[in-house]
């Protein structure tokens, strides 16, 4: 059975999705839009939009069966003045997580700062950090089909998928190193899953043994 990882980074306007399939050279990426917002800001309308978005995301995730792992960006929320959509964003993330768990899909989660440090080797804050992560992913995974890709797609979602591959043992273009494994220690994995402590341990655990003729 082919193994694959799907990464999700939902925001109120939609969800960035990245797929890495074992043996494939490049990830696949897509933006799933939320239903268009209108002047109706009632709780019922907000819940309806959240549920509809979550359903679209789940339909995409489960289209080919159950992934080996789904990795979600851990939702963070600033104060209401600087991040007014934060609570709704967390609401959507929670709804997607609930549906994934109910569908018996293995789910992991990575905090944004952890992912930033994992990609760049050190944490770089703010817009500069986001730009560097985007550049790193485009450089590392060159050749991704971006025709028609919505500009709202977050390239950090590709990094999320690659981090999930570290946890599942799927090789990617991102080199397995002791430092990268250490920087992923705050990744939340399914129960009973553990991340190797070193690159040597990772290769010992995940590299197939050669069979003598």
Image (cartoon, rainbow, N blue to C red):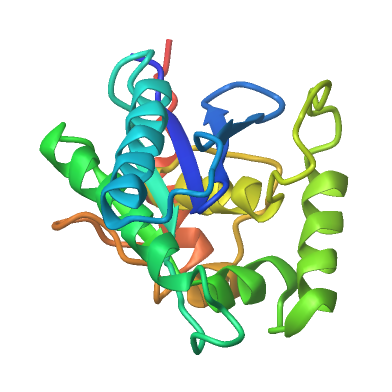
**Could you say where residue 52 lies in the image, as x and y percent from the top left?**
35, 33
How many numbered circles does the render carry? 0
Q: Is residue 152 above or below residue 147?
A: below
| In-front residue for pair 91/187 | 91
| In-front residue for pair 89/1 | 89
Left or right: residue 2 versus residue 84 is left
Q: Is residue 145 above or below residue 125?
A: above
**Residue visible at 29% across and 57% down in the picture:** 43
**Could you say where residue 190 lies in the image, as x and y percent from the top left?**
21, 54
**Residue visible at 50% across and 89% down in the picture:** 79
**Residue visible at 37% across and 60% down in the picture:** 109
For residue 196, say whether it is visible. Answer: no
Q: Is residue 180 above or below residue 124?
A: above
Quadrant where the C terminus is found in the figure: top left
For residue 150, say whether it is visible. Answer: yes
Hey, which residue is sitting farthest front in the picture? 39
**Could you say where residue 62 lies in the image, as x and y percent from the top left?**
33, 21
| In-front residue for pair 53/209 | 53
Left or right: residue 84 versus residue 140 is left
| In-front residue for pair 175/39 | 39
Quadrant where the N terminus is found in the figure: top left
**Could you say where residue 121 lies in the image, as x and y percent from the top left?**
71, 77
**Residue visible at 35% across and 45% down in the picture:** 50
Left or right: residue 212 versus residue 113 is left
Q: Is residue 178 above or below residue 169?
A: below
């Amino acid at each position: 059975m082919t193994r694959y990882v799907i990464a999700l980074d939902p925001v109120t306007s939609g969800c960035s999705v990245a797929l890495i399939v074992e043996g494939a050279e490049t990830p696949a990426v897509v933006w799933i839009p939320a239903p268009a917002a209108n002047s109706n800001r009632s709780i019922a309308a907000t819940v309806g939009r959240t549920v509809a978005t979550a359903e679209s995301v789940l339909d995409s995730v489960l289209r080919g069966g159950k992934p080996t792992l789904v990795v979600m960006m851990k939702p963070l929320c600033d104060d209401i003045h600087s991040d007014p959509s934060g609570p709704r964003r967390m609401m959507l993330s929670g709804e997607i997580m609930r549906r994934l768990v109910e569908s018996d899909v293995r789910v992991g989660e990575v905090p944004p700062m952890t992912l930033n440090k994992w990609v760049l080797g050190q944490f770089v804050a703010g817009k500069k950090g986001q730009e560097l992560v985007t550049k790193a992913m485009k450089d590392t995974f060159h050749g991704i089909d971006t025709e028609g890709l919505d500009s709202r797609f977050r390239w950090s979602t590709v990094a999320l998928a690659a981090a999930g591959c570290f946890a599942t043992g799927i090789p990617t273009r991102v080199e397995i190193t002791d430092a990268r494994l250490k920087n992923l220690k705050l990744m939340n994995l399914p129960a009973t899953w553990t991340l190797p402590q070193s690159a040597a341990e990772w290769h010992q655990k995940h590299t197939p043994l050669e069979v003598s003729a």
